Amino acid sequence: MPKMMFVNLPVSDLARSTAFYEGIGATKDERFSDGTASCMRISDTIHVMLLTHAKFRQFTPKAITDARTTTEVLLCLSEESREAVDATVERAAAAGGRADPAPMQDFGFMYGRTYEDPDGHNWEVMWMDVEAAMKAMAPAA
């Protein structure tokens, strides 16, 4: 079985957040969802667990940050092309997120944009030409 990633995010409105993630193409896995959590499938190996604040507090004694004012983590997903990056950010904005809270990045070999979900969690979306990136980052001869 391949390794899987479950990103756990505290959310203030579970229904709103679930609808947002469905709006960007995630699917809800009912097997791991209830009135306190929605398991959102991004891919076969990546899932986002949307947890009410009460549920999230069951896993940590630390305070829940306000993702609109404090950076908690930088999450990044890859896409197949620049156009796919743009399409993902546009879907996020249409679903109620905020497009481009950080400056767009275009290094030629790598292109990236960002969106925020309704709770302010930042998601970077990037495309990279790995071969060109390796050449660009190689030490000068």
Image (cartoon, rainbow, N blue to C red):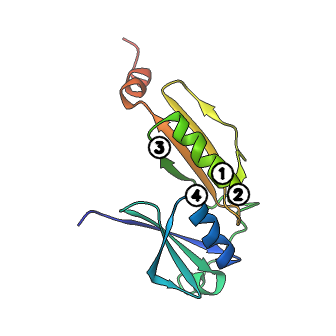
Observer-side mark, 1 or 4, equals: 4
Which residue corresponds to the image point at 42% horizontal and 27% vertical from the top-left? 133
Are discs 1 and 3 less than 8 Å apart at CB?
A: no
Q: What residue type is labelled 1?
A: Tyr
Residue that numbered label 4 is attached to: 24
Which residue, as the protein is rendered here, is positioned at the far top?
141
In the displayed structure, 84 sits above or below 44; it is above
Marks 2 and 4, how far apart at CA: 10 Å
| Residue 120 locus on image (x, y percent) | 70, 61
Marks 1 and 4, how far apart at CA: 11 Å
**Which label was assigned to residue 79?**
3
Are discs 3 and 2 less than 8 Å apart at CB?
A: no
Observer-side mark, 2 or 4, equals: 4
Are discs 2 and 4 less than 8 Å apart at CB?
A: yes
Which residue corresponds to the image point at 48% horizontal and 37% vertical from the top-left? 127
Q: Earlier in the sequence, mark 3 or mark 4?
A: 4
Residue that numbered label 2 is attached to: 97
